[in-house]
Image (spheres, rainbow, N blue to C red):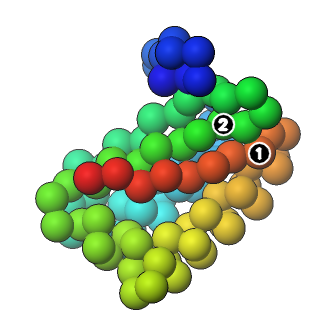
């Protein structure tokens, strides 16, 4: 969903960043088939929301959020290839 409430549908606004995010998260979790990444266009950024299977959110966030912060750093670097800024959010 965008800030105006419209959904991007199947359009992926940042294909390189999305592919990198999916690859990293799928390699961490126990159930890689349950990983879903949805994109939403904001005013100046794209928000990528990651949903994982039950019990996998703790693995993705890591101790004190270090794993999640590292994932965000790598995905932001990959998003420069797409020419946009991204925010990564993790959800159950």
Q: First in sequence: mark 1 or mark 2?
A: 2
Relative to 87, is 35 on the left or the right? left
Q: Secondary structure at mark 1?
A: strand
Q: Position of residue 81 (x, y in %)?
A: 81, 47
Q: Secondary structure at mark 2?
A: strand
Residue 13 placement: quadrant: top right
In the depicted view, which residue is nearer to us: 80 or 86?
Answer: 86
In the depicted view, which residue is nearer to us: 50 or 1?
Answer: 1
Up-down: is 89 above or below 46?
below
Residue drawn 45% across the image and 85% down it: 64
Mark 2 neighbour class, 10 Å CA radius: few under 14, some 14 to 19, many 20 or more:
some
- Residue with the mark numbered 2: 46
In the depicted view, which residue is nearer to us: 1 or 14?
Answer: 1
Please say if the residues under marks 1 and 2 sit with CB atoms less than 8 Å apart.
Answer: yes
Mark 1 neighbour class, 10 Å CA radius: few under 14, some 14 to 19, many 20 or more:
some
Query: Quick one: which residue is furthest to the front in this view?
Result: 4
Residue drawn 73% across the image and 37% down it: 45
Residue drawn 71% across the image and 57% down it: 76
Q: Position of residue 42 (x, y in %)?
A: 67, 29
- Residue with the mark numbered 1: 85
Q: Is residue 2 visible?
A: yes
Q: Position of residue 63 (x, y in %)?
A: 40, 87
Q: Is residue 82 visible?
A: no
In the depicted view, which residue is nearer to us: 64 or 50?
Answer: 64
Residue drawn 42% across the image and 62% down it: 25
């Amino acid at each position: 969903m965008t800030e105006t409430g419209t959904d991007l549908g199947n359009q992926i606004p940042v294909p390189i960043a999305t592919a990198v995010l999916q690859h990293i998260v799928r390699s961490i979790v126990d159930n890689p088939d349950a990983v879903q990444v949805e994109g939403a266009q904001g005013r100046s950024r794209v928000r990528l929301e990651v949903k994982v299977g039950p019990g996998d959110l703790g693995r993705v966030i890591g101790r004190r959020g270090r794993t999640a912060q590292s994932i965000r750093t790598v995905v932001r670097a990959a998003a420069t290839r797409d020419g946009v800024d991204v925010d990564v959010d993790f959800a159950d």
